[in-house]
Image: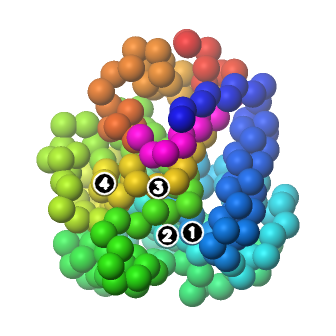
Amino acid sequence: MEKIEVVDSEEQVVHALVHFVEEKSKSAIAERDRFVMGLSGGSASTFLCKGLPMISSDWTKWKFIFCDERVVPFDDAECTFSVYKNNLFSKIPFNDEQFVIIDPSLPAKEAAEDYERKLRALYPDDVDLPKFDLLLLGAGPDGHTCSLFPGHPLLDVTDRWVASIEDSPKPPPSRVTLTYPIINNALSAVFAFAGAGKAELVKRLLKDKEDLPANRVKPTELLWILDRAAASQL
Ligand SMILES: O=C1O[C@H](COP(=O)(O)O)[C@@H](O)[C@H](O)[C@H]1O
């Protein structure tokens, strides 16, 4: 099931996003006593950090994993975990243990293997593919999502939960990313876009339906939240 929601402003994108996250967290906690959410960097992280403190929940039931992460030290501005930590921990009583983080001291390939082991530890041994409750996704101007870039061999990886990339066209070059079998096994995913800067990308994805990495995301439920500026070329 795929849905597009167009709202008036970036502020309303934040509200619509956090409303969706709240709804998914409530049902996951009611059904499975925990909520496992995948996080992305870039503008999606800005929206979530703004919106999440607006809701209340039993935060102890929340667990975060990363749809992709840059292999950089924690004090590097490019570290996605640190963006969330710096912006959320003073407002919501989260702790480090609720975030499944990469080990940035390892080379990218080892960091990806280590991260996959950490993700597998969240599930019983006999689980082939995890069913994350919700993935928060973003997409860059070239249509990449997570660290899955157009034309890159990583798009075809199906034998791992997590892959590494050392030649990311967007800096920093070393990253780890979820692969499509994992992304598409999620219960739901949401893209959130705001501003005229995303309009061309949104047109390529949702009107022209180009075969870009973000358009290969097909979980059970997919929501696109756009403000009017981002939707202006539809
Ligand atoms: O490098 C990345 O870029 C994408 C898109 O970011 P945006 O700022 O253009 O919205 C992001 O989703 C991904 O997590 C990140 O590593």
Distance Cα–Cα, label 2 vs label 4: 16 Å
Q: Secondary structure at mark 3?
A: loop
Q: Secondary structure at mark 4?
A: helix
Q: Which residue is mark 2?
A: 65
Please name the residue shown 74% across and 76% down the image.
59
Amino acid at circle 2? Ile
Q: Residues within 10 Å of mark 3 (few under 14, many from 20)?
A: many
Distance Cα–Cα, label 3 vs label 1: 10 Å
> Which circle's residue, 3 or 2, is located before the other in the chain?
2
Residue 53, compared with residue 82, is above or below; it is above
Find residue 109 and report its horizontal and vertical position in percent.
Answer: 19, 72
Question: Of discs 3 and 2, which sits in the foreground?
Answer: 3
Distance Cα–Cα, label 1 vs label 2: 7 Å
Q: Secondary structure at mark 1?
A: strand
Tell me where the magenta segment starts and ends, as one range.
Answer: 218-227
- Can residue 48 be seen here? yes
Amino acid at circle 1? Val
> Which circle's residue, 2 or 4, is located before the other in the chain?
2
Q: How is the image coloured?
A: rainbow
Quarter of the picture containing the N terminus is top right
Q: Which residue is mark 3?
A: 186
Q: Which residue is mark 1?
A: 36
The numbered disc on residue 125 is none
Asked if the residue under mark 2 is in contact with the one under mark 1, i.e. CB atoms within 8 Å, the reply is yes
Question: Of discs 1 and 2, which sits in the foreground?
Answer: 1
Q: Residues within 10 Å of mark 4 (few under 14, many from 20)?
A: many
Pointer 4 residue Cβ closer than 8 Å to ligand 1: no
54 part of magenta stretch: no
Find residue 140 and report its horizontal and vertical position in percent.
Answer: 43, 38
> Which circle's residue, 1 or 4, is located before the other in the chain?
1
